[in-house]
Image (cartoon, grey):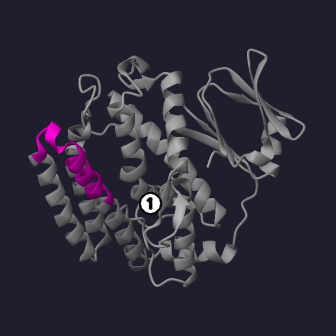
Amino acid sequence: MLNTLFVTTDGAYLKKAGESIVISVKREIKLRLPIHNLGGIVCFGRVLCSPVLLGFCASRGVAVSFLSSGGRYLAKVQGPTSGNVLLRTEQYKRADVISECLPIARSTVLAKIANCRTSLQRALRDHGDKGDSSRLEKAISHLGIYLQNVKNERDIERIRGFEGYASRCYFAVFNDMITAQKESFMLEGRSRRPPQDNVNALLSFAYTLVLHDVISALESVGLDPQVGFFHRLRPGRPSLALDLLEEFRPVLADRLVLSLINLKQVDASGFSREESGGVRMDDWTRKVVISSYQKRKQDEIVHPFLEEKIPFGMAFFAQALLLARFLRGDLDGYPPFFWK
C-alpha cells in the first residue's frame, strides 16, 4: 500500500541510477529507491525527471504523473498499455449504448449516496451533541429519499440529476461534521479550480490522490480509465476513473479531510491565498495529507461484497476487478462499494 512515490518538493530532480531512482534537491541526494518497490510516481509542482528515468519507468510499467502544486492533473508518462483487448472492446461497446450504461451508473450513484448517508450517520452518532443535530438528521432523511428515487429510476439523465441533488444536500451539512478549528475551516460551497477555501483545498487534493490510485487499479485489470458509464465522455477526462471515484469520495477522501481538521493535524498556517483568489497548501501540509492517506490505505476493512478482510487501498483494485468480471459476463451485475 506504500508503492506510490509522491514528490512534493519544488526543485527536486529524479534520475536513474542502476535499478534505482535517485531524488536530489540542490544536488544533495535525499532518497534512493529500487524501482521494483514502486507502482507509480506522482510529481507535484516544479519537479524534474531525466529523460533516461522516464524511459526506464515506462519500460518497467511505472507510470509517472505530473500535477500542479495544488493537485491539478497535467500529464502522465506511461509505457505500452497491457490488458485484454476483448475486455476493452466490450467496455467500449457498452459505453456507446445508454441502456448498457444505466445499470452501472445506477449502482455507482447508489453507492455514493449510501456512503454519504453513512458518513452523516456516523457524524451524528459520534458528534451529534456538539452542534445542531437536526440539520444532520434532515440531510440523512433526504439522502434516503434520493436513494429510493435512484433505485427505481430508468433514465440516466435523471440519475445524474439525483446525484447532483444528493451532493448538494450532503455538502450543505459538511460543516456540521467539522468539530474543531471552525474559524479556519469552513466549507463555503464546493469550488474546484481553484479551491476558494481551506476545506476545498484539502478535499480537491484528497480526491486527486484517490483518483490516481483508481486509475492505476483500472489499468491493472485491463480497463480504459477514459471511457466511463456515468460521467460523460470528454477528451482528456478519465470518465471511468471518476465513476469509480464517486464510491470512495465520502468514505475515504472526505473522512480523511475531516479527521485531519478535527484532530488538528493541519492548521490555518498551512494555507495561503494566491493572487488569483484560490487557496494553496504549503509543502508541509501536502506531506501531512499524503502520509495520512497512505496510512489509511493500510487499514483493514471487510469488503462488503467479497466478505474478506483486505487493506483499504486494495478496495480500488477489488472494485476494478469486479467491474471487469461484470463486463466479461461472469457477474449478473456490478456490485459497488457500500461502506458499513
Q: Which residue corresponds to the image point at 29% horizontal and 60% vertical from the top-left?
A: 113
Residue 228 location (% of width, % of height): 48, 64
Q: Does the magenta segment cover residue 127?
A: yes
Residue at the spot of label 1? 243
In the image, is 132 to the left or to the right of 111? Answer: left
Q: Is residue 233 visible?
A: no
Compared with residue 196, is residue 319 higher up or lower down, i.e. above or below?
Answer: below
Q: Quadrant of residue 224?
A: bottom right
Q: What span is in magenta? A: 115-133
* In the image: residue 242, left or right of residue 153: right
In terms of image quadrants, where is residue 80? bottom right
Indicate the quadrant where residue 304 lies: bottom left
Above or below 214: residue 200: above
Is residue 291 at least partly visible in the picture?
yes
Q: Quadrant of the C terminus?
A: bottom left
Q: Secondary structure at mark 1?
A: helix
Report the residue at 25% width, 61% height from top.
161
Which residue does the image show at 75% across and 53% down from the upper left? 61
